[in-house]
């Protein structure tokens, strides 16, 4: 069973526009969520996170929104830049666990 | 600051061979993890360790073994390699104590032929 789902395998956005990446989860015990970014031939790198006590967290061009009732989170990137082209993974952690459950990833392509 | 270092970067094995994927971290992190990533899929947890001498199974442990004799090193052993183990393997570490952000190595791409 896929507890963390990213239903869009790919997304193409024009440079300067907003990119919105979505993630759904099924486990109501998840209380901490992270987004990772991955370039080819590199390991994932941490981008931004949010605790379930918040519904929004912002870091520069990146904002993560959490809708607990819908078990949905999204990552907004604005404005999108060519260097944002990468695979983005959503991950979640349950209360007290030091383990992460990852989604399948969404490949974001920023077009000039 | 090297972070998490994985060796080798690439390897081709024959069916039935064995090998050890090396992982070392220099951040003095308590927690270490091994994941595999198959094409179009997310990262699946193979094994993890909460400290030297302590390891536990993740979601997909079959066919793998680990050990953690030091804080820095967390090798992953493949015994009797099978084609289903063709994947990209990532090692990660985190400080623990409620700090959940994991830091990843650049991966080992393994092909079993």
Image (cartoon, helix red, strand yellow):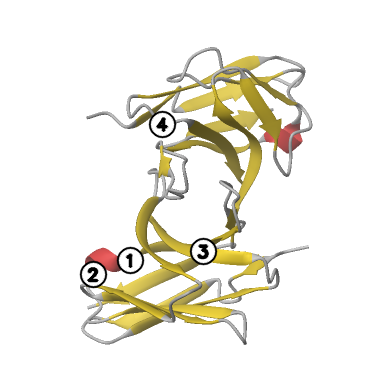
Question: At x 41% / y 36%, what residue is drawn?
Answer: B105
Asked whether residue B38 is in view, the answer is no
Along the viewing direction, whichever of B61 and B97 lies nearer the viewer? B97
Give the residue number, with chain letter if any, for mark 1: A85
Residue closer to the observer: A31 or A87: A31
Secondary element at tag 3: strand
Label disc, if present, on residue A32 of the rendered structure: 3
Position in image of residue B65 (x %, y %): 70, 22
Label number found at residue B29: 4
Q: Are marks 4 and 3 on the same chain?
A: no
The Cα–Cα distance between marks 4 and 2, rounded to whole angstroms, is 33 Å
The foreground one among B42 and B40 is: B42
Marks 3 and 2: in contact by CB < 8 Å? Answer: no
Protein chain holding label 2: A
Q: Is residue B95 above or below residue A62?
A: above
Chain letter of the residue beneath label 1 in the structure image: A
- Residue at the image position 56 percent from the left and 66 percent from the top: A31
């Amino acid at each position: 069973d896929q507890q963390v789902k990213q239903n869009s395998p790919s997304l193409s956005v024009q440079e300067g526009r907003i990119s919105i990446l979505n993630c759904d989860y099924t486990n109501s015990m998840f209380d901490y969520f992270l987004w990772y970014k991955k370039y080819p031939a590199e390991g994932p790198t941490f981008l931004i996170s949010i605790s379930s006590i918040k519904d929004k967290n912002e870091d520069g061009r990146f904002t993560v929104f959490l809708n607990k009732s819908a078990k949905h989170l999204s990552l907004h990137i604005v404005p999108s830049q060519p260097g944002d082209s990468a695979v983005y993974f959503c991950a979640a952690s349950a209360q007290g666990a030091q383990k992460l459950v990852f989604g399948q990833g969404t490949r974001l392509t920023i077009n000039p | 600051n090297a972070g998490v270092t994985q060796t080798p970067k690439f390897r081709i094995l024959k069916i039935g061979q064995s090998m050890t994927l090396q992982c070392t971290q220099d951040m003095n992190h308590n927690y270490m993890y091994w994941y595999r990533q198959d094409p179009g899929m997310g990262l699946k947890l193979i094994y993890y360790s909460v400290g030297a001498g302590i390891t536990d199974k993740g979601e997909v442990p079959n066919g793998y073994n680990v050990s953690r004799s030091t804080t820095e090193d967390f090798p992953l052993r493949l015994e009797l390699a099978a084609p289903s183990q063709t994947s990209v393997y990532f090692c990660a570490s985190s400080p623990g104590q409620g700090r959940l952000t994991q830091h990843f190595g650049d991966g080992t791409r393994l092909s079993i032929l």
